[in-house]
Image (cartoon, helix red, strand yellow):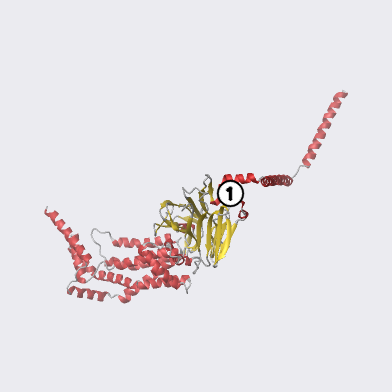
Amino acid sequence: MEQKKFDLNSIIGFALIFGIMMWIMYQNQPTQAEINAEKAKKEQATKVKEQSQKVAETTALVTSATSDSTKVSAALQASLGSFAYSASLPSAKNEFTTIENDLVTLKIANKGGYIADATLKKYKSIDKNGKLVQLIKDNNAGLNIALQTKDGKKVNTKDVFFEPTLTKVDGNQVLSMKLKAGENQFLEYKYVLKANDYMLDFDVRSQGLASVLNTSNGANLEWNLKGYRNEKSVSYENTLTEAVYEYEGGKDTYLGQSQDEKTVEDLTYVAYKQHFFTSILLTKTPIKSAKLTSENLIKDTAKDTIFTKSFKSSLPLAFTNGELDYKMNWYYGPADYKTLNAYDRNLDEIISFGWGIFGWINQFIFVPLFGFLSGFLSYGIAIILFTVIIKLAMAPITYKSFLSQAKMKVLRPELNELNEKFKDPVKRQQETMKLYNKAGVNPMAGCIPALIQMPFMFASFKYFPSAIELRQQGFLWAKDLSSYDSIIKLPFSIPLYGDHVSLFPILAAIAIFFYMKYTTGDQQMAAPQQEGMPDMSKIMKMMIWISPVMMLIFFNNYGSGLSLYNLFSNIMTLGIMFYIKNYVVDDKKIHAQIQENKLKEPKKPSKFQQKLQEAMEQAEAQKNAKGKK
């Protein structure tokens, strides 16, 4: 009995002790903050241990390398061949060599010898902090020449160190970057930057490498660049970003907008144009069979907002007597017509002024006229005065067009009589031409002036998007005349229209609506409906609404300078037409003149009228011949 009692007491005692211990452990368990602190302490200890281990390994490696330079030399020799010499030069310890003038700052990487940073000092980016435009930064561009040594080693210049030597010659900064295979054996990049110039000389030459390199396959220069976005509208900038190149002694063209690849013979320059800025590589020795590639990087404008396009050029270089010797140039600067044209290297073709007559109007009229006006006026006022001058110069042509419409309007009753009298289309057309001839009216006179004005309109669509002078220049509510003048930011995006509302396109659309409304009535009255021909009155009524809508949609994302030009262009045209109609053209005088012309001997028909008359007579003869059968 005593044993059982002892056992029961023991069990109760142990239970009490266990409970007390559990309570003590519960009361003394660490808080979450203490747990986190302990965890951080352990992680820090682990990092310190790892860093110590790395330092120890590095120290051991350096010690090993120092004590066994033969092994280091052998490793370098295995990877670089004869160019292992370059790895032992002091240049391997430095990162960049900088050359600059008042326009541009260029940082050349000692490793690779290429331009690793190109900053334009006169132009600010869209960054809110007002940073300068950088065409090259953060490894978005690269230059490499692929070489092969006689012992079969492949060497890429981007991976090896060049020895820099910076001097000044005649006020020019001269930077010699040498990739050495020996004291007097090297590949040299020679940069020469002049004062106040965006263009720099770039010579690529070798010395003493005929015994080092396998020259049978030549060398391949590779230049690539991913264009950084520099403007407010990434989609608008992207449409004006493209690769332009010159080939075969002066021909020039460009790669496609989406994705394009071309093999070009006798290439003399390739330009990576980024709307208002451009990077250009030029060579005085044409490159045979160059391969150029362009890729559009913007798939979604809401997400792809950093880069626009990716460009790549593969340029094979030929050895002459076992050595390379190419005289080249780099250009990093604005895509400005005057600046590029001054080099006399056909670089003005990089500016998209349009082909044929459109380009001529821009080069010989728009550029000098706007340049003169903007020299002493604000850019917004200069655009308005520029528009006034162009429209006043076009006023005589506008007058001729309106006068022709007025004559056709006076003849309208007689033309209607001919339509009623002659049901046969050919006969009616013949009689209509006779009436025109007697009255001294040329039905084409109203079309020709309009055709003359059209090239000026299309030229403006090319000029204003390319005018770098407008970049970041404000006028009224527009902060930047080279970009859209947003007054309302929409919480959503409308297809084709965008996620904002621009005011200048709205005003331009209103102006073109009233202009077309004012002129459409006279055009409909002047030209009678011809059988078998489309009803022009219905078409003109549709255009009254279609033209303003197109203006609203497509110009919403365009530069506000172009919308401002179109606004005042339509206002001026409307004003000129109103003045001519009410104060110059007199319907009664025109009617009297036409009646007087009818009494005179008809003028000899023009060649066009003669050919048209002959064609109608042949058609009439063929019709009669079929009728007899």
Residue shown at the point (23%, 65%) measured from the top left: 608
Q: Is residue 368 left or right of residue 523?
A: right
Residue under the point 84% across and 32% down: 13
Find residue 266 and report its horizontal and vertical position in percent.
41, 55
- Residue 70 lies in quadrant: top right
Q: What residue is pinned by disc 1?
A: 84
Kind of element beneath mark 1: helix
Residue 480 placement, left or right of 72: left
| CA neighbours of label 1 inside 10 A, class few (<14), some (14 to 19), many (20+) | many
Query: Which residue is nearer to you in this view: 150 or 188?
Result: 150
User: In front here: 506 or 104?
Assistant: 104
Quarter of the image for the N terminus: give it.
top right
**x and y, in percent, of residue 340 in the image:** 45, 64
On the picture, is 260 further left or further right than 618?
right
Q: Determine the image quadrant of residue 172.
A: bottom right
For residue 38, say whether it is visible. Answer: yes
- Would residue 244 be visible to someone looking at this image? no
> How far across and how far down the image is residue 6, in percent?
86, 26
Looking at the image, which residue sits at the far top? 1
State the image coordinates of residue 427 (x, y, percent, origin top left): 17, 62
In the depicted structure, whether residue 582 falls above or below residue 232: below
Quarter occupied by residue 107 = bottom right
Left or right of 524 on screen, residue 285? right
Residue type, mark 1 in image:
Ala
